[in-house]
Amino acid sequence: MLYAILAAGEGSRLAQEGCEVPKPLVRVRGETLIRRLIRVFIANGATRIVIITNAQHEATQTYLGNLSLPVPLDIVVQSTPSSMHSLYAIREYLASEERFCLTTVDTIFPEKEFASYVNTFNEGFLDGLMAVTTYVDDEKPLYVQTTDNLTITNFCDTKENRCDYVSGGIYCLTRKSLDTLSRCIAEGKSRMRNFQRQLVADGLHLQAYPFSKIIDVDHCSDIPKAEQLIQDWL
């Protein structure tokens, strides 16, 4: 299975708070955010990993270039205005396989739950399986509206009826989703949440997969919080 990491953001909030390394190289329990994801992906059957990183983050580029991995690693260096544009920039790699899993570089999640999540996607016939959680730890959460069987019917900026979950920033999708992505770009849309809304509008079968907790490392204060969560999950 192909995995992808979106790491082309500026990480401006961490930088403003005094973090001296790009977000992908922030360490949580001694492991960089990006290396943790790579390790988890390899443990869950990665056949190839694609990473898009910010053009201004030379330290990240050097770090990735020095890695020795048991699977091919493709590195795309490009600054993008949104995660949706980052996804579009690596679409040719994603199109090489029927199914792929991607995440933003700052997600912290339970590894055992992630393994079950990937297995569920690989064993089913969904167009997409989206990681969700009831744990809200985002300044601007994306609420996920679902039916009783967790079929996704909408993505909302505010908590609406049947919005019991928020998006966790982890996505399992099929090649079919790339047609929607290309059209979003052609129509001048931006932001990953608008791409997800369009997936629903286009009739793709998306289902929510609940995680106990998922957090993003956006601020320096998130680092000890992430470390404590990982310790609790061991």
Image (cartoon, rainbow, N blue to C red):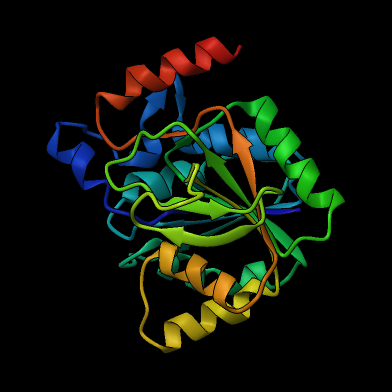
Residue at 25% x, 33% y: name it. Answer: 219
Q: Residue furthest right?
A: 123
Residue 2 can be seen, yes or no: yes
Q: Nearer the viewer, residue 214 or 203?
A: 203
- Quadrant where the image shows the C terminus: top right
Residue 5 can be seen, yes or no: no
Numbered circles on residues, count: 0
Residue at 55% x, 76% y: name it. Answer: 201
Image x and y of residue 54, in percent: 35, 57
Image x and y of residue 95, in percent: 68, 73
Image x and y of residue 196, in percent: 51, 65
Q: Is residue 106 left or right of residue 79?
A: right
Residue 50 quadrant: bottom right
Residue at 73% x, 43% y: name it. Answer: 118
Q: Residue furthest front?
A: 161
Residue at 13% x, 39% y: name it. Answer: 16
Residue 42 quadrant: top right
Image x and y of residue 31, in percent: 48, 24
Q: Nearer the viewer, residue 231 or 89?
A: 231
Q: Nearer the viewer, residue 181 or 206?
A: 206
Q: Is residue 127 left or right of residue 188?
A: right
Q: Is residue 150 left or right of residue 78?
A: right
Q: Nearer the viewer, residue 176 or 135?
A: 135
Q: Residue furthest bottom?
A: 186
